[in-house]
Amino acid sequence: MSNTLTESGSRGRAGDKVFSGIALFAGCLILFVLFCVAVFLLWQALPTFTADPAEITGGSGFWTYIWPIVIGTLIAAAIALLIATPISIGVALFISHYAPRKLSQGLGYVIDLLAAIPSVVYGAWGMTVLAPALVGPYVWLAENAGWIPIFAGPASQTGKTMLTAGIVLSVMVLPIITSLSREIFLQTPKLHEEAALAMGATRWEMIRMTVFPFARAGIISAIMLGLGRALGETMAVAMVLSGGGLIASLIKSGNQTIAAEIALNFPEAFGLRLAELIAAGLVLFVITLAVNMVARWIVSRHKEFSGAN
Amino acid sequence: MSQTATRTPSPLRKNTLTKNQLPKWAIWAVLAGSLVLGAAVSSLIGFHVVGWALFSAVIFVIAGFLVTLSVEGERKAKDRFASNMIYAAFIVALVPLVSVIWTVLEKGLPGMTSNFLFTSMNGMTGVVDNETVENGTPVLGGAYHGIVGTVLITFWATVISVPVGLLTAVYLVEYSRGGPLSRGITFFVDVMTGIPSIVAGLFAAALFGLIFGPSTRTGFVAAVALSVLMIPVVVRSTEEMLKIVPNELREASYALGVRKWRTIIKVVVPTAISGIASGVTLAIARVIGETAPLLVTAGFVNSINFNAFAGWMTTLPTFIYRQLMNPTSPTNIDPSAQRAWAAALLLILIVMLLNLIARVIARLFAPKTGR
């Protein structure tokens, strides 16, 4: 015995199964893609690890080739974070606690504009505007602070140095750290803030006593996410830095980052060189994956009282 | 005793409430003083507007601290110092933004001609550029091929990412019950947001290199690379939107005997469609400016290519990069620079427009709330 009710019901049930199956498939596809990224990179990079060390660029094996640019990547990211972190936290505080209430949303949008500008435009700006403008300060630094190894002269005459690249990177990570910190600062319980103010605390004391302790985990993870971006950013470094071997001085041309090394050499690469660059990409992937996982882990551990995710 | 009570208060301390407090004009006086002093100091080492602003700011912060310290005490002085530093941070953050936008407008506007928009670089050699500079004629050649490439590659990336991202979000919100699989997907989607764009490009290049032989570069490879970057953004925004659809709507639909999948398609997704659409638009805005993955997946050509599945393709970002790094004419780089900046202006306009559209969609089609 069949009637319209059960008929439509069975068809609907099939639809239910199909739809939930497709949704599940899409979810698993994402995990699969991430897995594939790792596997394919490893697969294509394999020749590098099995090849004769003398054939690798530099002539003494992959690790000798990769470690200077890993260090270069870390230096660039460190400069970017050193500059961007205090400024971003200041800007986030300005938007959440200092600016007039009516303006704050608009100001947040202005900072988000920084994130909307494509990285290649930052690269172009860095190489044509920022680098020439920094030649003067670099020469001054080399003359007056040259005894510090990182400012050892003679300064680059084009301004295309590691410090310039770090400054451009800091502009690019600033909106990320700012918007995440702002979200967290806004979630500080109003009662805590008002209680601190009612006890006679100044605005800065209120921020130090209520906002910062509440937001600490969120700020750390925001910085880690900024670090992930700074490590992987390619174009700004490729266009702003005139690369070379690893050197301590930040105001001479030299140093290189993984991402820029790949972008600059990939179009002409083939054979073993291609495998080398893909292996370099794999190293970068592992580093950023680790940084991001730690950041996300911190966020998820503090999820119940911080809104950052 | 009575003598102290009747003593006239000093004119400085009229009122106990304003005691130990700087008058309102004091901070402006400090500002004016530091501007003058800053001008003096900066003229010692050769006057420059940047130096003037820098010295004045430093002097203002220090002087503000000292003045407040002497009148209002240590706590207020620290508060003043912190406030000034925070205002300074905001101003410093605005400097690069203004500088970038000013540079792009200044250098890009002269190149924004119809010739730039509707011709490609086909046949444009260094000789042509040299002649342009010598004769002072308008710059020839443009970014039409780049515009075509950007539109096609972004289109295919959207076609791949939106269904996958949307369905994953549906799975996470509607079907999963917080099991290890859904927690894993959420976690790795977050992690995927942080994949360096060049690694995504390498992945697509490696994948297609394995299947179609090494150095396979087409627009579609680039689209795959971009969708790796785009999917997590779509998932995150869609997930947030689906989560705020009120449960009452779903329950009302179930109570009428509607199947779960029909509820999702007819009730849940339409309610959240404005948020989803604006999220997708923002995701497009994010990937449209990507350069690094395109360098390694789509190659670079001077001619127009309408076929995303065969042949190399140029996009606006790679066009900018190549014109600046490898000028068409190595001796006369001005025409190339002009084309590059015009393309940068166009790209920024597109991204800003997409951001604006996202905001308008979110506002216009927002579900009616309340009553």
Image (tube, grey):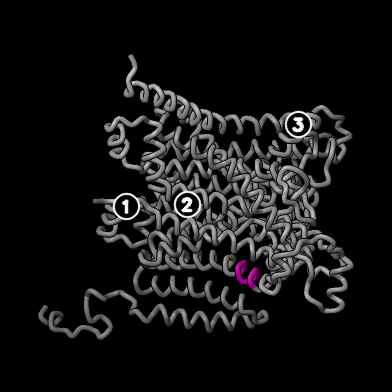
The answer to whether marks 2 and 3 mark residues whose Cβ atoms lie closer than 8 Å is no
Q: Report if residue B175 is visible in the image.
A: yes
- Residue under label 1, please give it: B368
Give the amino acid type for the residue marked by disc 3 in the picture: Leu
Give the amino acid type for the residue marked by disc 2 in the picture: Ser
Q: Residues under labels 2 and 3: Cα distance?
A: 36 Å
- Residue under label 2, please give it: B278
Name the element at disc 3.
Answer: helix
Q: Viewer-nearest of labels 1 and 2? A: 1
Residue in view at x 84 percent, y 35 percent: A272
Q: Main secondary structure of the magenta part?
A: helix
Residue in view at x 71 percent, y 34 percent: B207
Please determine whether, in this image, residue B124 is positioned above or below residue A228.
below
User: Quadrant of the rendered structure where residue B79 is?
Assistant: bottom left
Badges 2 and 3, same chain: yes
Instruction: Pinpoint the chain carrying mark 3.
Output: B
The answer to whether marks 1 and 2 mark residues whose Cβ atoms lie closer than 8 Å is no
Quarter that holds the N terminus of chain A: top left
In front of the other: B156 or B180? B156
Task: Assess whether residue B266 is covered by the magenta stretch.
Answer: no
Instruction: Pinpoint the chain carrying mark 1.
Output: B
Q: Viewer-nearest of labels 1 and 3? A: 1
Q: Position of residue B52 (x, y in %)?
A: 59, 78
Residue in view at x 35 percent, y 62 percent: A203
Q: Position of residue B366 (x, y in %)?
A: 38, 53
Q: Magenta stretch: give its range.
A: B99-105
Disc 2 or 3, which lies upstream in sequence? 3
